[in-house]
Amino acid sequence: MASLPGMPAPLASVIEHLSAMPGIGPKTAMRLAISMLEKNRHDVVSLAQSLHHLHEQMTFCERCGCFAEKHRCMICDAPSRNHALICVVEQAVDVLMLERMQTFRGNYHVLHGRLSPIDGMGVEQLRLKSLDARIEAGEVQELILATSATVDGEATAHFIARRYAAVDALKVSRIARGVPEGGELEYLDEYTLSRALDQRVTWD
């Protein structure tokens, strides 16, 4: 797609870079590149500068592993958050998704992956030592395991639960799996229905 006859090299280069991004195919990349070409120069330069400074201005929180502009993220520095409650997630983007609810007032810990021997992700590749340190500090009362509902995600959750099972006064919980709000049973897979039944709650 990037080497279509008559396509100028600068445009082909932009398309090639864009198509290397997750979820962007060659056709979408070409539409985006042409859209940038049609925009005014100021907007395109502003975008280019943002991309140029992205790695210089962004990092990961040294405490929880989430996106941060400095050494610590805004969530870890917020005095209103409950530091005794930690939600464990796989990726930093998961924090952004959970924060959309605006109901969870605890803190987070980002593993930056999940156990997956096929992908070369073992215990040493996950941010578990920093989680050990937070728990050993004695302020954590509950870990909420919010890893994905995949085989690897479940394996990661089970491993973490076993890792801290002997820690006194530490509660380890797992986010619920089951029927989504407004979901029709006929459209759900067997695994989701099974988890919904297993994690049923008493009717209030």
Image (tube, rainbow, N blue to C red):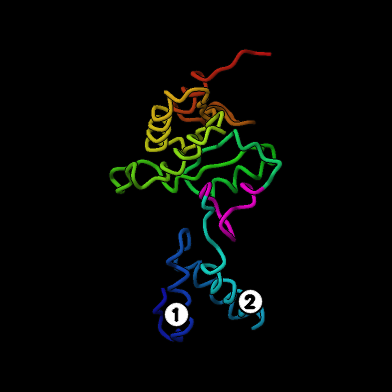
Residue found at x 49% / y 18%: 198
Q: Amino acid at mark 1?
A: Ala
- Which sits in the foreground, 129 or 147? 129
Residue found at x 50% / y 39%: 134
Residue found at x 56% / y 77%: 34
- Which sits in the foreground, 146 or 86? 86
Q: Is residue 190 left or right of residue 53?
A: left
Q: Residues within 10 Å of mark 1 (few under 14, many from 20)?
A: some
193 relative to 87, above or below: above
What number is the disc on residue 12? 1
Examine the residues drawn in magenta and state their main secondary structure. loop
Q: Is residue 1 left or right of residue 45?
A: left
What number is the disc on residue 34? none
Dividing the image into 4 quarters, which one contains the C terminus?
top right
Image x and y of residue 147, in percent: 47, 37
Residue 107 counted in the magenta span: no
Dividing the image into 4 quarters, which one contains the N terminus?
bottom left
Give the extent of the magenta segment: 63-77
130 relative to 145, above or below: below
